Amino acid sequence: MNDLPICVTCGVQYAAPRENCPICEDERQYVGWEGQRWTSLNELRATGHKPLIAEEGAGVVGVGSDPATAIGQRALLVRTPGGNVLWDMVTHLDDELIRQVTELGGIDAIAISHPHFYGSMVEWAHAFDVPIHIHAADRDWVGRPDDSVVFWEGDTHEIREGLTLINAGVHFDGGQVLHWRDGEEGRGALFSGDILQVVQDRRWVSFMYSYPNLIPERPGTIHRALSLLEPYSFDRVYGGWWKRIVHTDGAEAVRRSADRYLSYALDDRAG
């Protein structure tokens, strides 16, 4: 399946050749300025993409490629005594990357925050013979349907002991974050992709319906996300890109970031 089409702009692999990428045509993303372009895993390997593995935190290893693909995100291998979860996804995959991840203990499950990060998820699932956990609200965005994709419903879903998916619903209706209860020596960690995006000032996060097109998220959606996160403690927030990490007091950072966002979103003053 190494010649299946991959959208150059978003990095998502599709089951068969097609003219358009629905993910990029949606108002939350964009078609590249040079028009719709396609690549494949074979082409990425031939053009010199290599694995990039680096520690991002205690028990958390970043997984990406050099050069980066798509919008430059990296995945995170969350290593726990109960099994390893690959959080989020990248496009590139080759034998060397499989070998390196296997040496780190392999993968027992995959979970992905939202459709922009679906990448080559089915290739990864087949390589490690594991399920992919995606919220059912994003079912229609899966470009390569496969038995490895497990859709869940509701607000929360525990995929391993102490590892819980939360349907925050920001950015996409099925947008999910991963809470690791035992991360950071028991203080907890939250893996947010860009459902809650860690911004350049890494003491803060933000919430958007579309990041590239600067469409703000609805206040009601943010209030719902906060209520779902309230029972969970977490000291760190791991965003979707290398080193985009809130290093301490993560739960409070999310709360104060939401307060700041909502104070502007609900401000009816002119100007």
Image (cartoon, helix red, strand yellow):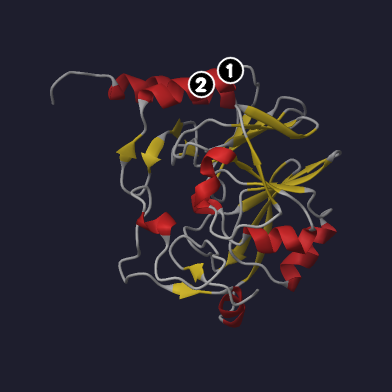
Q: Nearer the viewer, residue 196 or 116?
A: 116
The residue identified by callout 1 is 230
Residue found 61% across the figure and 46% down from its top: 112
Q: Residue at x 82, y 60 (%)?
A: 102
Secondary structure beneath disc 2? Answer: helix
Disc 1 + disc 2, Cβ < 8 Å: yes
Q: Nearer the viewer, residue 263 or 173?
A: 173
Residue 75: horizontal and vertical position, in percent? 63, 52
Kind of residue at badge 1: Glu
Q: Is residue 89 left or right of residue 36?
A: right
Total numbered badges shown on the rendered structure = 2
Neighbours of disc 2 within 10 Å: few (<14), some (14-19), many (20+): some
Residue type marked 2: Leu
Percent from the top left, x then y, of residue 267? 24, 19
Task: Give residue 89's quadrant in the image.
Answer: bottom right
Provide the residue designation for mark 2. Answer: 226
The secondary element bearing badge 1 is classed as loop
Task: Judge left or right: residue 200 versus residue 148.
Answer: left
Outermost residue to the right? 81
* x then y, percent, for residue 130: 77, 53
Q: Looking at the rendering, in which quadrant would you find the N terminus?
A: bottom right
Residue at 68% over, 55% down: 54
Q: Quadrant of residue 118?
A: bottom right
